[in-house]
Amino acid sequence: MKFMIIVKANKDSESGVMPTEKLLAAMAKYNEELANAGLLVDLNGLQPSSNGSRIKFSKGERIVTNGPFPNPTELIAGYWVIKAKSREEAIDWAKRAPFDIQPGDTELEIRQIFELEDFAPSDAIDQHAKLRDKLESR
C-alpha cells in the first residue's frame, strides 16, 4: 500500500522561513532511514503558496487564482510517499519525523493513495496501467 504523509503548512512555511540546519540534518537522517527500510518512494518540500496558483473548473470555465492563499493550516508544505504494509506502519513511521526539534507546531496528515488495483477492470484502467508501466520503466 502507498501512503502520502502530508506536512501541513503553517505561518512560518507560508512566509518562506527556511528550515534550520538542525532540522535539515535530522530530516536527512530520517529520510535515509525510510529509504534503507525500503519504504521511501518520493519526497519533496513545497514553496509557499505565494509562488503557487489554483485552477478552478466551473461550468466549463477554468479560473486561475494566484497565491498566496488564506488558511495556512489547510495548505501543504511538503510530503513523503511511502510503501507500507498497513496504515499503522505508515503512522509509526510518520511519528518518527523529527519535527519535535523545532519550536512551534507541525501537523502531519496520512492518506492512502489509490492504486489501479483498487478500481474495477476497464479499458480506461488498462490505459492507465500502460502509462504507469511506461513511467516506471524510465
Image (cartoon, rainbow, N blue to C red):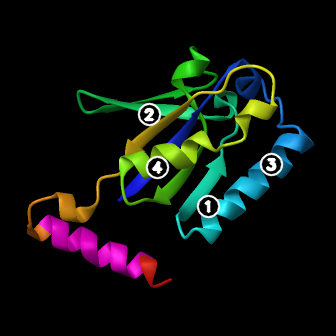
> How much space separates mark 4 and mark 1, taking CA atoms?
11 Å
Q: Quadrant of residue 15?
A: top right
Label 3 secondary element = helix
Q: Which residue is mark 2?
A: 55
Q: Which residue is mark 3?
A: 26
Tell me the number on the disc at residue 119: none
Q: Amino acid at mark 1?
A: Leu
Q: Nearer the viewer, mark 2 or mark 1?
A: 1
Does the magenta run of residues contain 31?
no
Q: Which residue is mark 4?
A: 90
Label 2 crowd (10 A; few <14 / some 14-19 / many >=20): few
> How much space separates mark 3 and mark 1, taking CA atoms?
13 Å
Left or right, 119 with reference to 61: left
* Numbered range of the magenta stretch: 124-135
Q: Earlier in the sequence, mark 3 or mark 2?
A: 3
The residue lying at 83 percent from left, 37 percent from top is 19
Q: Amino acid at mark 4?
A: Ala
Give the camera-side residue of 72 and 82: 82
Left or right, 41 with reference to 58: right
Tell me the number on the disc at residue 34: 1
